[in-house]
Image (cartoon, helix red, strand yellow):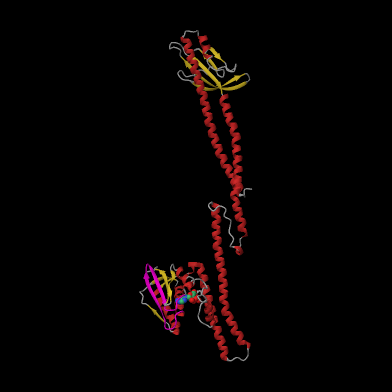
Amino acid sequence: MFDSVRVRLTVWYVGVLAVVLAVFSTVLYVMVARSLYDDLDDDLRLSLKMVTVKLVKELGENRPERQAALDAVNELSTREAVAVFNSSGALVAEQPAQGDIHAHLPAANTVPPSDVYLGTEKLRVGREQVSRRVAAEQINVNTQDAPYTLVVSESFDTVEDGLGAIRDLLYIAIPGALLISGMGGWFLTRQSLASVLAMSERARRISAENLEQRLPVINPRDELGRLAATFNELLSRLDESFSYQRRFMADASHELRTPLSVMRTATGVTLEREGRTEGEYRDALKIIDEQARRLSHIVEDMFTLARSDVGRQALRQSDFYLDELIMEVARAGEVLASHKGVEISVAPAAETPFHGDEGLLRQMLLNLLDNSVKHTPAGGSVSVRLERANGHHAITVSDTGAGIPVEAQSKIFERFYRVDKARSRAEAAHGATSGAGLGLSIARWIAEAHGGQLILKSSGETGSTFVAMLPVNCEF
Ligand code: ADP
């Protein structure tokens, strides 16, 4: 039963309220009781005063002692038992309460000579023991006379009636309040948990196949609404990453299919007829070799991208000089460039120590240089420059190629994106070193994994300029 949040919340709610009500009622009860007992004592003091005034007045008028005392005791209501004793303790006059209860002289020496004695005494009335509040005082009518003792007593009935009424009220009010609040709590928790139940019901039905579904958000401003919204954001991110993975798989298989089908066609056509010449076999093997290279290039790129998904942990860091790395990559690029009739120039740069993954940065530079050479016609040039600007190492690769169409410029860093897919595949089929549209996305990831960035600074009819910015992180 306590496994239900609803039951637990209601029990807590009622429990806390019960404790608060118990403390509050106890404090209230004690305060009212004290005040009622104080009122009773005040009443008795007042009665003593009234009897004293009357007695003093009557004796002052030289009335006989007994008559004066009788007149004085008759001043009070019949609720109070009152008695006047003379100095030797003999009863002079009395008025019993309820016709039977007498006010006795309190135990000897307990009445102080100049103060009011207040105490609770047990009296026997018939067969019963009753408790009564007693007030006594010694009074001197004039200084020569020995003192009289006045005793007034009253029952606790009024106090007990008052307290009994309060107790009756609390006995009904507290359980009533707990019952109402318990029912209210039960209803409120049902209302608030309804959205949780709806959310869990919907969440149970969401799987990889229907990740576009979202949890219901009943009130977006309350905690549960915010929880649902956060969960929906998580679902959106998962949905995005799932569809990204699906797209990636589709694109990857598409890219792998082209070289494979070229290879199968080459082998099929060659083997179709017997008695081929060595030259024909060589041509077929050449096509297969080129396509195999292309395949391994794509697989390597995909492997690098898989590393990119692991993030920075994938880096194998060491200290090296960026300017030396650029020279080395430019020399490697010159082989392809001179073949095409494109000139590569590297601007002189200062010694630039750097801490990072040398292999990955080499790949980034090779991709940029390779693209520039590939898209620059014979007679054109590619220049590489390394500078320090605003706390960054800026590596600029510019070419004098035909540039990238404006509508494609924002997409070239996406995985598998190529400006002219048809042309690229046709080139690929004929053995050109065109990539699968992964080069720039890999290059950008490498720059970002080093805390830097890669941007296309400009591109137009006169050529394109890419800038890779890497943080200054080493001064050895
Ligand atoms: P790939 O590996 O197929 O070259 P990239 O991701 O490196 O793919 O490049 C994406 C697209 O950007 C390419 O299809 C290419 O047309 C275009 N591109 C990249 N660099 C240049 C450049 N320097 N000049 C013109 N076009 C470029």
Question: In the picture, which quadrant includes the C terminus?
Answer: bottom left
Q: Residue 233 appears in which quarter of the rendering?
A: bottom right
The answer to whether residue 412 of the structure is visible from this angle is no
Foreground residue, 432 or 74? 432
Check residue 378 for magenta coloring.
yes
The answer to whether residue 226 of the structure is visible from this angle is yes
x then y, percent, for residue 300: 52, 75
x then y, percent, for residue 59: 47, 10
Instruction: Say above or below: 379 vs 28.
Output: below
Tell me what residue is drawn at x 58 percent, y 31 percent.
Answer: 167
Tell me what residue is drawn at x 56 percent, y 37 percent.
Answer: 22
Left or right: residue 119 compared with residue 203: left
Foreground residue, 66 or 400? 400
Check residue 381 for magenta coloring.
yes
Q: Which residues are magenta?
A: 375-404
Instruction: Say above or below: 337 vs 194.
Output: below
x then y, percent, for residue 23: 54, 37
x then y, percent, for residue 40: 52, 24
Count of marks, rendered view: 0
Tell me what residue is drawn at x 59 percent, y 36 percent.
Answer: 174
